[in-house]
Image (tube, grey):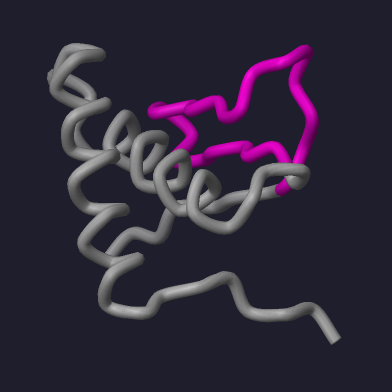
């Protein structure tokens, strides 16, 4: 299985960026946990399913993040 690489990076007011050909995403580290989950899924969808349009990717991100949040998924503390 190919793994998506990620890093936390501020990008001129953008919450996340996807680089499908590189299988890489960037996510703003200042996001709250729930928004970070949504954006991570959203950007991952751009990488894994590049033929989806923005509305489809946005819908997938919001619904998957909502489900995972309700299931208790949270960002691990970096201690």
The quadrant the C terminus occupies is bottom right
Q: Is residue 68 above or below residue 77?
A: above
The quadrant the N terminus occupies is bottom left
Which residue appears at 40% of the width and 75% of the height?
A: 73
Asked whether 14 falls inside the magenta stretch, the response is yes
**Range drawn in magenta:** 8-28
Which residue appears at 78% of the width and 13% of the height?
A: 12
Please give left or right for residue 5 compared with residue 63 in the image. Answer: right
Please give left or right for residue 22 compared with residue 58 in the image. Answer: right
Please give left or right for residue 20 compared with residue 54 in the image. Answer: right
Which residue appears at 22% of the width and 52% of the height?
A: 64
Residue sticking out furthest to the front? 70
Which residue appears at 64% of the width and 18% of the height?
A: 14
Q: In which quarter of the image is residue 45?
A: top left
Q: In this view, does 18 lie above or below 61?
A: above
Asked whether 69 falls inside the magenta stretch, the response is no
Query: Which is nearer the eye, 69 or 2?
Result: 69
Query: Which is nearer the eye, 56 or 68?
Result: 68
Query: Which is nearer the eye, 6 or 71?
Result: 71
Q: How many labels does the image show?
A: 0
Pinpoint residue 57: horizontal percent, then vertical percent.
22, 27
Q: In which quarter of the image is residue 60?
A: top left
Pinpoint residue 37: horizontal percent, then vertical percent.
45, 53
Q: Is residue 60 above or below residue 79?
A: above
Residue sticking out furthest to the bottom? 79
């Amino acid at each position: 299985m190919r793994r998506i690489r990620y890093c936390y990076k501020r990008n001129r007011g953008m919450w996340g960026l996807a680089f499908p050909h590189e299988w890489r995403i960037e996510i703003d580290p200042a996001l709250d946990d729930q928004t970070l989950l949504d954006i991570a899924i959203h950007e991952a969808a751009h990488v894994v399913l590049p033929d989806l349009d923005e509305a489809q990717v946005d819908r997938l991100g919001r619904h998957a993040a909502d489900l995972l949040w309700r299931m208790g998924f949270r960002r691990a503390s970096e201690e």
